[in-house]
Image (cartoon, rainbow, N blue to C red):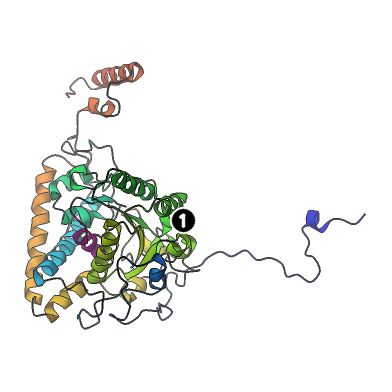
Amino acid sequence: MAESPVRSGKPRGNLPPLEFHVPEPRYRPGDTVDYSHLVIPEAGTVTRPDEACDARDTWPLTTDLIRVLDDAGYALGPWNPHLDPETLRRILRMMALTRAFDDRMYRGQRQGKTSFYMKSTGEEAISVACAFALAEDDMVFPSYRQQGILISRGYPLVEMINQIYSNRADRLKGRQLPIMYSAKDYGFFTISGNLATQFPQAVGWAMASAIKGDTRIATSFIGEGSSAEGDFHAAMTFAAVYNAPVVLNVVNNQWAISSFSGFAGAERTTFAARAAGYGIAGLRVDGNDALAVYAAMEWAANRARANKGPTLIEHFTYRAEGHSTSDDPSAYRSAREAEEWPLGDPITRLKNHLVALGEWSDEQHAGMDKALAEDVRAATKEAEKNGILGHGLHHPFHTMFEDVFEELPWHLREQAEQAIRERRTKWPEWKE
């Protein structure tokens, strides 16, 4: 009896053998970088549909790229939000402050003052411009590179640094990894290290807001790598089915730690194009163009507030530095990628726009940067009075057992008493 080709696994007839595909980035360390494969339209050329349009009217925009600022610094086209110069300066200031804060905290980690930090260099326009486009009481479910939203909403830098240092003034009592902030009174949900959990949480919050007849919407951010998680698809399904007043943002910065965007599906189509599969509105925006980001978020927020449903926005950008202080990007990508990125630096682009308008100058910008660096330095010195990593200034030991249960169960109470007793025995000089 002949062996079955199913059992043998042998090729049948003249059929070619199957091939397994593994995505591979275009550039590795040492490679010459060439971004000519990217299709980048001229600023101002993409159409802007009405905010109340049918979702399918936005689908051509999911494979295009919304841009407002041209290379000369001028704002062009129907997506130009026509912001006044003072608002533009405030956005620029918050972006620059976010970068100054990142730089200082990065140095602090290298000096051993904290265990971990994550910068948002090159992505400041996404968090800051979105914060300005949203209402202050809209709820944000962030990822770990949206510190610009907290800063734009006026959250004290000292409180952010206390959390990064996990010191005795940390509102979260050292229970969260540094940079995983939580600020309920600023509409900023707790950052989670579990990828993409914030997406269904944002949709659920938005559904609850609609059920209550509230006027607040929700928004959430994930990286493009996290869009491969099941939570992304669960969120999209619920948002579409229940017409949730939510704006879902995918920050496509090309790299999820050392895995390039192709592993999340970027080789096939854009991340914004997934909106069409769920029947919701979608936009793809130049993430290094603060005016384009503002316009896209304002459009999507207005749509959600008008009960026209959710929007998926892809922010096309580049992670200019390492994923975190634990990462060395030179091990997996070309050092030239960040320098050659064709969409430029978001802070420089907005600065050039204000200069083109006659509302800013290089001298004013340099002065602002110096003043902001001093503000961050002063906040850092103030926070360091409350302690830094390993210097013993932290919350009392007994607090590690608190804030989970309204009443501590008997077995945890016993564990707490035992732990405190053993600590006192080992360190008699120890005080709460």
Q: Start and end of the magenta stretch?
A: 117-136
210 or 310, which lies in front?
210
In this picture, residue 186 sits left or right of residue 365: right
Placement of 55 over or under 156, stated as above or below: below
Q: Is 400 included in the stretch rendered in magenta?
A: no
Please provide percent x and percent y for residue 263: 49, 61
Give the secondary structure at mark 1. helix
Residue 152 in view (yes/no): yes
Query: Residue at the spot x=18%, y=63% of the render?
Result: 95
Quadrant of the rendered structure where residue 122 is?
bottom left
- In the image, residue 411 sits, relative to residue 26, either above or below, namely above
For the N terminus, the quadrant is bottom right
Q: Quadrant of residue 336?
A: bottom left
Task: Name the side, left or right, on which 263 lies relative to 121.
Answer: right
Q: Nearer the viewer, residue 331 or 124?
A: 124
- The answer to whether residue 123 of the structure is visible from this angle is no
The amino acid on which the numbered mark 1 sits, given as a three-letter code, is Ala
Please say if 121 is above or below 420. below
Q: Quadrant of the C terminus?
A: top left
Q: Residue at x 11, y 54 (%)?
A: 377
